[in-house]
Image (tube, coloured by chain):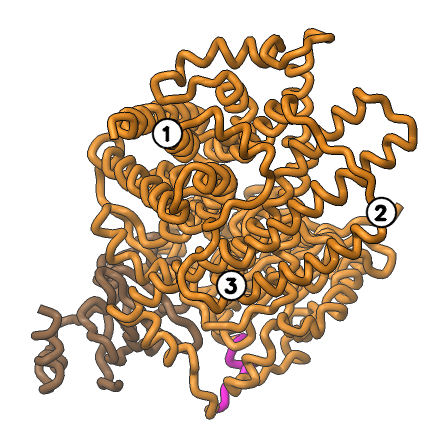
């Protein structure tokens, strides 16, 4: 499944979708900007304090199981996909 | 008497608080029981300008909103612990993130000092700071520090004394007018002039007294109060950051990302983890083995005869000599020989923690842990468990969810610690031709029983979903050797302190029990024998038939390694000590030469592949020979399994009671006894039929 998504992204499909994307939809190497949170869960307050705030640019460095490693300015943060689903993003470009 | 200043050392995780504490307190550091992990209170004492500065290291946190246990500890210490000065450590390169906590700390209105730490890293990344502006706007001292070299730490202490002497508080933070008006109104209602801004904001967001203002603000901004407060703080922090910090485009390429491509690779990463674990155990055993042998020789062949000689010259009676050789050397001396092993394990775990690899293990292993219904973060306490169960249980505080936390706590006691290894290495070498395999199997058995326990709990008491996980991965850093050494030294001090108190007390009690009623000729007539014999029936089915062994299990509840020192005391009552004349200076020379050889051998062992320790039978021949008579290979194995699984450790049970509750700890203790007995029974009976 993941491979198929990767394949799609390689050919520029799926990234131009108008529907709201979440951090969980991003593949390794993708860069995006956080636009907002879809709920007010306590854990999101902590994530914000850790540096994943609306307006920030992020890059997905690695995905392992349910874990996603993202970098933002000077820090690297691991979050699980259930949390990532509540973080809305706008894709910028794909870099490697 | 010097005046004392209590300083709360605060900051985000991985900003180098511990290294600053280390440079400030030097040898006067007490770090609890475990390497590196800041979950429990670490403290340091230092004398500066006529004051005694008491630095309390609070858990690393991102915000003072108490969600997790760590945040609660920090929040409570700041509000109720009444520190004299707050020291806020900022990782300079990451200041944009760190300033939120700084702001929350400023709201407390206490005398405060900021340390801009890791200034060298920041410069490399092209981050420049206007410290003058920072200090002027906030009206507090701002000091640049370098955790690696300790530069700036003296200035930091100067600043702490200065703000304390002058009771210099920061300039009050001013948010936007509407928000400030609301706070002023809440303050009037509370009628407490001395209340700080942080508490006032808490009143506004939660209390009945702030309800009217809360509703008004929410109506005006069309947002809930949490978001309004959050926005106020972030806009202040962001504005302040933009004024004070400048980021240039740096040419420094980030080495962490490149290393992570390999270390966190889905496939290579896993094998690197396995290799790292293999190295951890290989180095622990092989490197420490020659040094342990030397320590044993030094105590038995040098220290003990020298003290005995001095005692004889001072006119000590036969009774005192007997006490010295049996209770002191036989008990405490034996346990001290394990200092090199414990030191090496702590050293390696501290390296893993401080280099930044430890949190990566959590990310890497969550894939597998998740399948078992466990949290990736649980991997760290479980690994620490191999060092010592006590700090491992404390480290479960980083798990926010009680279910995840209890599951890991229930597994930790089955992770075999060096105290058990002490017993295993003694018995395995004595009874088996390939002791390394026996010991390895025991470790695996412990892990399996731990997993089984977790599985069982998930199906019964802890049904429910696994919680999410959020964690920062710090950049890779070369650990400061001096910091690691100081932390390890603090652990060893703690171990020696236990050897000197708890273990010594246990040895003395056993020795007395072995020698009453007075005038007995044979230890089998003693009070100890009576107690031991009366509990023997419980252990008979698992192959432990000798009263001397069941007796040694009683004091072993204090700590497992005591089982051997107790056996040492009980058995040495039967062993004649050799008396020989020797020349102190010559012997000392001989010991020094032996030490050089031992160090050489330790270093050489690192170059050999495989785990080579535990192949040869060396050491205390007397004790080994007499114990050999009391066991068969099957009963020795059953005994080791019993000690592996039964939580025979007062400290572990005590910390479990504190972290999970008294009843949980007691039920677990009974469970561990039962499972230990059952597994030992099966193994013993299968072994007997082979």
Q: Quadrant of the C terminus of chain B?
A: top left
**In this rendering, which labeled residue sits more in front, label 1 or label 2?**
2
Quick check: is B244 in the magenta stretch?
yes
Q: Position of residue B184 (x, y in %)?
A: 56, 53
Residue B605 has which mark? Answer: 3
* Gap in angstroms between the C-alphas marked 3 and 2: 32 Å
- Label 3 residue SS: helix
**Residue contact at pointers 1 and 3, CB within 8 angstroms:** no
Relative to residue B166, is residue B478 drawn left or right? Answer: left
Marks 1 and 3, the one that precedes in the sequence: 3
The residue sitting at 73% across, 56% down in the picture is B27
- In the picture of the structure, the residue carrying the numbered disc 1 is B638
- Chain for mark 1? B
Residues in magenta, as a range = B240-248
Q: Residue at x 51, y 80 (%)?
A: B242
Q: Which residue is mark 2?
A: B583
Do the numbered discs 1 and 2 sit on residues whose CB atoms are within 8 Å? no
């Amino acid at each position: 499944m993941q491979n198929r998504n990767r394949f799609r992204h390689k050919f520029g499909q799926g990234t131009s979708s108008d529907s709201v994307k979440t951090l969980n939809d991003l593949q390794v190497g993708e860069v995006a900007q956080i636009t907002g949170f879809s709920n007010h869960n306590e854990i999101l307050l902590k994530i914000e304090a850790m540096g994943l705030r609306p307006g920030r640019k992020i890059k997905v460095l690695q995905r392992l199981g349910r874990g996603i490693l993202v970098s933002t300015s000077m820090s690297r943060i691991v979050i699980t996909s259930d949390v990532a689903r509540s973080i809305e993003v706008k894709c910028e470009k794909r870099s490697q | 008497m010097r005046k004392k200043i209590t300083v709360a050392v605060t900051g985000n995780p991985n900003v180098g608080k511990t290294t600053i504490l280390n440079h400030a307190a030097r040898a006067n550091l007490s770090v609890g029981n475990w390497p590196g992990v800041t979950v429990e209170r670490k403290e340091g004492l230092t004398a500066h300008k006529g004051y005694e500065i008491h630095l309390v290291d609070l858990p690393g946190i991102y915000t003072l909103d108490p969600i997790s246990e760590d945040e609660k500890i920090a929040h409570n210490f700041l509000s109720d612990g009444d520190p004299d000065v707050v020291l806020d450590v900022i990782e300079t390169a990451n200041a944009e993130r760190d300033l939120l906590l700084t702001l929350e700390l400023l709201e407390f209105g206490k005398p405060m000092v900021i340390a801009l730490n890791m200034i060298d890293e920041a410069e490399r990344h092209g981050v420049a700071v206007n410290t003058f502006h920072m200090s002027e706007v906030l009206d507090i001292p701002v000091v640049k520090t370098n955790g690696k070299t300790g530069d700036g730490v003296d200035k930091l202490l100067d600043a702490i004394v200065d703000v304390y002497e002058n009771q210099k508080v920061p300039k009050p933070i001013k948010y936007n007018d509407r928000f400030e008006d609301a706070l002023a109104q809440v303050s009037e209602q509370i009628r407490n002039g001395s209340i700080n801004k942080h508490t006032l904001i808490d009143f506004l967001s939660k209390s009945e007294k702030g309800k009217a203002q809360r509703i008004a603000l929410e109506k005006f901004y069309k947002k809930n109060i949490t978001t309004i407060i959050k926005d106020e703080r972030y806009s202040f922090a962001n504005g302040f950051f933009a004024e004070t910090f400048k980021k240039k485009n740096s040419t420094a390429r980030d080495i962490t990302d490149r290393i992570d491509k390999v270390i966190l690779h889905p496939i290579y990463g896993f094998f690197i983890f396995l290799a790292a674990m293999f190295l951890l155990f290989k180095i622990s055993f092989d490197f420490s083995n020659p040094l342990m042998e030397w320590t044993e020789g030094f105590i038995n062949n040098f220290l003990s005869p020298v003290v005995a000689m001095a005692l004889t010259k001072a006119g000590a009676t036969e009774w005192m000599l007997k006490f010295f050789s049996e209770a002191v050397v036989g008990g405490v001396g034996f346990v001290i020989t394990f200092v090199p092993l414990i030191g090496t394990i702590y050293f390696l775990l501290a390296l893993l923690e401080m280099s930044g690899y430890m949190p990566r293990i959590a990310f890497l292993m969550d894939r597998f842990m998740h399948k078992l219904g466990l949290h990736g973060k649980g991997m760290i306490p479980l690994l620490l468990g191999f060092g010592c169960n006590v700090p491992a249980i404390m480290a479960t505080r980083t798990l926010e969810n009680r279910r995840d936390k209890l599951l890991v706590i229930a597994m930790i006691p089955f992770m075999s610690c060096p105290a058990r290894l002490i017993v295993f290495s003694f018995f395995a070498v004595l009874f088996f031709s390939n002791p390394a395999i026996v010991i390895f199997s025991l470790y695996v058995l412990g892990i399996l029983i731990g997993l089984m326990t977790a599985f069982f709990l998930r199906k019964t008491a802890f049904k429910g979903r696994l919680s999410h996980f959020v964690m920062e991965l710090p950049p890779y850093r070369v650990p400061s050797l001096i910091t690691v050494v100081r932390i390890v030294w603090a652990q060893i001090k703690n171990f020696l302190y236990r050897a000197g108190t708890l273990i010594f007390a246990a040895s003395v009690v056993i020795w007395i029990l072995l020698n009453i009623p007075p005038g007995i000729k044979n230890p089998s007539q003693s009070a100890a024998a009576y107690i031991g014999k009366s509990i023997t029936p419980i252990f008979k089915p698992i192959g432990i038939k000798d009263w001397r062994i069941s007796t040694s299990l009683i004091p072993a509840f204090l700590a497992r390694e005591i089982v051997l020192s107790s056996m040492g005391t009980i058995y040495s009552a039967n062993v004649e000590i050799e008396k020989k004349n020797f020349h102190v200076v010559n012997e000392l020379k001989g010991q020094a030469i032996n030490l050089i050889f031992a160090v050489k051998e330790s270093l050489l062992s690192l170059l050999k592949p495989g785990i080579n320790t535990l192949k040869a039978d060396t050491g205390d021949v007397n004790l080994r020979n007499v114990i050999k008579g009391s066991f068969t290979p099957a009963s020795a194995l059953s005994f080791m399994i019993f000690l592996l699984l039964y939580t025979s450790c007062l400290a572990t049970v005590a910390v479990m009671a504190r972290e999970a509750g008294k009843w949980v700890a007691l039920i677990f203790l009974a469970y561990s006894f039962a499972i230990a007995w059952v597994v030992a029974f099966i193994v013993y009976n299968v072994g007997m039929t082979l």
